[in-house]
Amino acid sequence: MGKVILITGGARSGKSDYAQRVAEQSPGQHIFIATCVAVDPEIEDRIRKHKKARKGRGWNTIEEPIELEKALAQAANHEVVLVDCLTLWINNLILRAGDHLASLTEKSICDLCLGVLDKARGAFRTAIFVTNEVGMGIVPDNELARKYRDLLGRCNQVFGREADEVILMVSGIPVSIKPSR
């Protein structure tokens, strides 16, 4: 059984950089699963910067915005996986649901998360997941934004509960909120 680490925090809190450092300190072959879709020039630039930060450091990459279990299965010949990020994964699931958004429930998100965790725990020595903490601000003023917050919040709860270790990034500083078991 592999170790699962969840790294959470606000936007631009240092989650991705910290996750990469933790992964690179873990022995074995490393793979990065990216859930971000290049939808505009600014996002394309962010993706380029993330790729540059991994270049020459022994990383392989899979870009998969929705089918995380499938991507994890593809990556199973590696010892360390870094999934960045669950925040965009939930966003992508919502976008794919489109007019059928009502079918995407907190229960269905829990089931998807448990499937991803099961696959990761069984396939890797270390699995690191990055997510944003979006529930600490104001209540969104529209239904879609509240749905997103609720689904991501449920996802984060499942990963937090099941993870062996949870780190909260605050202003670039890692704070252990669930020490390694």
Image (tube, rainbow, N blue to C red):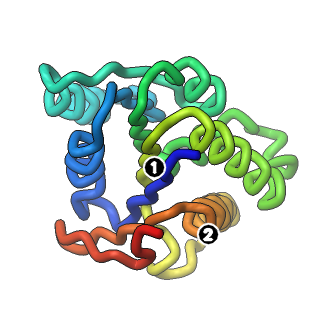
- Measured in 3D between alpha carbons, the distance from the residue under mark 1 to the one under mark 2, in whole angstroms, is 13 Å
> Residue 180, position in %: x, y?
42, 68
Give the residue type that dot 1 points to.
Phe
x 85%, y 51%: residue:
102
Among the two numbered marks 1 and 2 on one chain, the one whose residue lies closer to the N terminus:
1
Image position of 16 with respect to 54: above or below: below
Could you tell me if residue 145 is visible in this image? no
Judged left or right of residue 81, residue 71 is: right
Occupied quadrant, residue 139: bottom right
x 42%, y 48%: residue:
128
Judged left or right of residue 106, residue 36 is: left
> Residue 39, position in %: x, y?
41, 28
Q: Which residue is tagged 1?
A: 129
x 80%, y 39%: residue:
99
> Residue 112, position in %: x, y?
73, 45
Image position of 66 with respect to 143: above or below: above
Q: Which residue is tagged 2?
A: 161
> Residue 9, position in %: x, y?
36, 67
Give the residue type that dot 2 points to.
Arg
Q: Secondary structure at mark 2?
A: helix
The crowding category of the residue bearing disc 2, from other C-alpha atoms within 10 Å (few below 14, some 14 to 19, many at least 20), is few
User: Could you say which disc has been placed on residue 12 in the image?
Assistant: none
Q: Secondary structure at mark 1?
A: strand
Occupied quadrant, residue 179: bottom left
Q: Nearer the viewer, residue 77 or 20?
A: 77
